[in-house]
Image: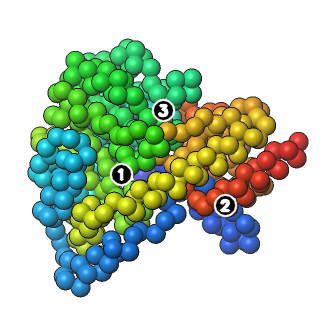
Amino acid sequence: MKQLAQRMSRLGTETAFETLAKAKALERQGRSIVHLSIGEPDFDTPEHIRQAAKDAIDHGYTHYGPSPGLPEAREAVARHQTLRQGYPIEPGRIVITPGGKPVMFFAIMALVDEGDEVIYPNPGFPIYESMINFVGGKPVPMRLNEESGFNADIEEIRRKVTKKTKLIIVNSPNNPCGSVIPDSDLKKISEIAIANDCYVMSDEIYKDFYYEGQHTSISRFPGMKERTIILDGFSKSYAMTGWRLGYGVFPEQLVEPVSRLMTNSVSCTASFSQIAAIKALDSSQEPVHKMVAEFKKRREVIVEGLNSIPGIRCPVPKGAFYAFPNISGTGITSRDFANEMLEKAGVALLSGTAFGAFGEGYIRISFANSVPNLEEALRRMREYLATRK
């Protein structure tokens, strides 16, 4: 049997899905598991969005559509982004994708040649590093430190940029840290990108999940609209993870090559899903606001609870729906902590190292679960650590 292509050895994974599979297997054995690992709202997709998809199927939206998306869906996204970003965005810059990950996949494939460097957040969403490695690029970590609120050192970014740097990735609010990049730092990163002729991919999938303040996109700064790729979608804000529905706002020169990658890979995004997306964007955003308000209450429960456990300290996340507590005081490595909590305590959470080497000493907890479940998880964690030898 011939071997796999060598590039497959450079392809990573997303530990959240592996942990979910292990947790489900334990549940099938009769174990009780509290799920705090997967980054998925526990809310249902709002009824009016579900109904729009059903109606779309009945009205024949069951066929192929254009690779970059249905014209009416691209127009709806452009209206939405124009309103949110505060500057005009044309429908021709929008590419609708089956989930948010294809935006990062296609952007990196279209831009990064072998040996090109990409600066990315670490700890950060693991697919960034995976895709950079897969295409033969060189991942250059932008370390996020707890001491600086899990934000990067701007001078370190400046030092790490070389003539080979093709792309800088920013993610605010951040997964896994829940941090938000200050406007002043976004401006400095934009100046670095312009001075060194780099593209920026701005992952804004959590743009609605702010507990204080409002979202600012790096694309707003002078000279950045022409070099920023905005990654966004419907999974988080509208509780539509299973719909696989995302989009990118691309500089004009990238729309055609990314559309070609769509044609060569998935052909197009499901048409009836795109009709539902229009309904999501053009209807009242009250369901989004209610969900975020509930997550703010849960944030208080999880942060207070974690800080009450000996050996754990948890900063208050400013956005997204993740806590990233420091567990170094327990004397347990991140990987062992996650494994033991799942297997011994019945709590599914993620090792900080699932998000990069600089995640050692931390774990990620998704508080997209009910308050009773969060309280039960905290009880189990506290009791297990108290009895661990």
Q: Which residue appears at 43% of the width and 44% of the height? A: 210
Determine the secondary structure under disc 3. strand
User: Of 364 and 68, which appears nearest the observer?
Assistant: 364
> Up-down: is 181 above or below 32?
above
**Could you tell me if residue 336 is visible in this image?**
no
In the displayed structure, 360 sits above or below 257; it is: above
The residue type indicated by label 1 comes to Lys
Q: Kindly indicate whether the residue at mark 1 contacts the one at mark 2 (C-beta within 8 angstroms).
A: no
Q: Residue at x 67, y 39 (%)?
A: 334
Q: Do callouts 3 and 2 mark residues in contact (Cβ within 8 Å)?
A: no
First in sequence, mark 3 or 1: give its number.
Answer: 1
> What residue is drawn where x is 83% and y is 50%?
383
Q: Quadrant of residue 228?
A: top left
Which residue corresponds to the image point at 20% horizontal and 41% vertical from the top-left? 86
Residue 108: horizontal and vertical position, in percent? 29, 40
Q: Which residue is mark 2?
A: 373
Q: Nearer the viewer, residue 71 or 105?
A: 71
Q: Identify the amino acid type marked 3.
A: Asn
Q: Earlier in the sequence, mark 2 or mark 1?
A: 1
The residue pinned by badge 3 equals: 122
